[in-house]
Amino acid sequence: MIQYLIKYSDSSACLDLVSRRDVSTYKRSNTSRFHRLRPIAPRVEFRPNSPNRKYEHETYMQAIVYHDNKDIRLEDIPEPVPGPGEVKLRITGTSICATDIEEWQYGPLWVQHGSPNALTGKQTPLVIGHETAGTVAELGEGVDNVAVGDRVAVNTVLICGTCFWCMRGQQSVCPNMAVAGFMADGGLAEFMVWPADHLVPMPDSISDTEGPLLEPATVAVHGVRRSGVRPGDNVAVIGCGTVGLLTVQAFKAAGANVIALDVREQSLALATELGADEVVNSSDEQAAGSKLLELTGGVGPDIVVESAGAKETPRMAIDWTRRGGTTLLLGIYSTTPEINFNDIVGPEITVIGSVATSPGDLEAAVDLVASGKINVKPLISEIVPLSRAIEDGFERMLGPNKEVFRIVIQPGS
């Protein structure tokens, strides 16, 4: 059984969602594999001006390539070649998330465009997809931590390891960060090359279709760690999309009492199935606020998590947080929220932003999913072959059906 540690400091208790086998990660010196992550080594690149032209002595694969706003294409491009310290992965699944859709429709926002990324040397056109898993197909020089045939989850975030923040252990806010699918070739392809020290073994209890959802699960784990939650805390989660429902489960694993809020009854039913102690329909804001007070003994939740990303929900989260409590912001906002900062200052509310991942988050997510504490299966809405990724994946997620969580793309399916 996985045993989780609760680390207490002089000022507070904070659940550390990390199994005992991962504790050494936090005790390593500057030689830790998480301390300094080198840029990707040079490899065979496809020619942006003639992406479908065949070149002698190259083996080709299918991939979804981002060119520009509303311009993604299924193309044949050269298979990548692993350099020193890298592996070539045969992709077993990559899921499409809302960020991919936003980049397609409104980008390039995060996608490297116009100049090469300083860490990876990549820019558009590049292969998209950042929620991915695969099987090791080929080893680059010097790789000894994985073997051909290993099933692995992929930490798709690269950091410089040398900046002020990395040196302070705040890798999740490295300003030089590069993410697969945005600043480097990602997982919507038959093969992908990635640093070997960014791979985590994936047990047989996690299927190929579940593997891609380990990435959004790390977002939930990171948020829980950032929140400073204590066992027994009352936590309200606004927004029961994929990340919201994963966050519900991660807080439950941390020992919290969890209240899920959404305007969709189907999503609330799923939240109950996945372990939420209570669910509240938030379409009537005043009634929802009153219900939260009722469920928390008249004081309000200790932590309110905003994972909907809507204009009004950050204000709602702050309003519903108890005096002296914490508001955790997980959403990405396309419009500027309207917030009265006196509502933060007066009741001394702590507001925390959380978006990326830190060392140990992926390992913890793998343990939580493998142990059944986080169930990702209900969040897989459909499995689509790579050849139909645009029509049956991207276009479907752009449609009016708001009950689509993740569509998993599998080469050869």
Image (tube, grey):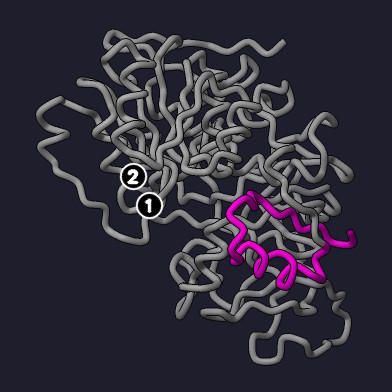
Q: Residue at x 44, y 42 (%)?
A: 307
**Residue 312, image x, y percentages:** 30, 49
Residue 231 among those drawn in magenta:
no
Question: Which region shows up in magenta?
Answer: 385-413
Q: Residues within 10 Å of mark 1 (few under 14, many from 20)?
A: some
Q: Residue at x 31, y 36 (%)?
A: 317
Q: Relative to 183, does residue 300 appear above or below in the rendering? A: above
Assess whether mark 2 and mark 1 are in contact (beta carbons under 8 angstroms).
yes
Left or right: 409, with 252 as reference point: right
Residue 398 among those drawn in magenta:
yes
- How far is disc 1 from disc 2 in space, using C-alphas? 6 Å
Mark 2 lies on a secondary structure that is: helix
Task: Determine which residue is flagged by label 1.
Answer: 310
Left or right: 234, with 219 as reference point: left
Disc number for residue 313: 2
Callout 2 amino acid: Thr
**350 or 302: which is nearer to us?**
302
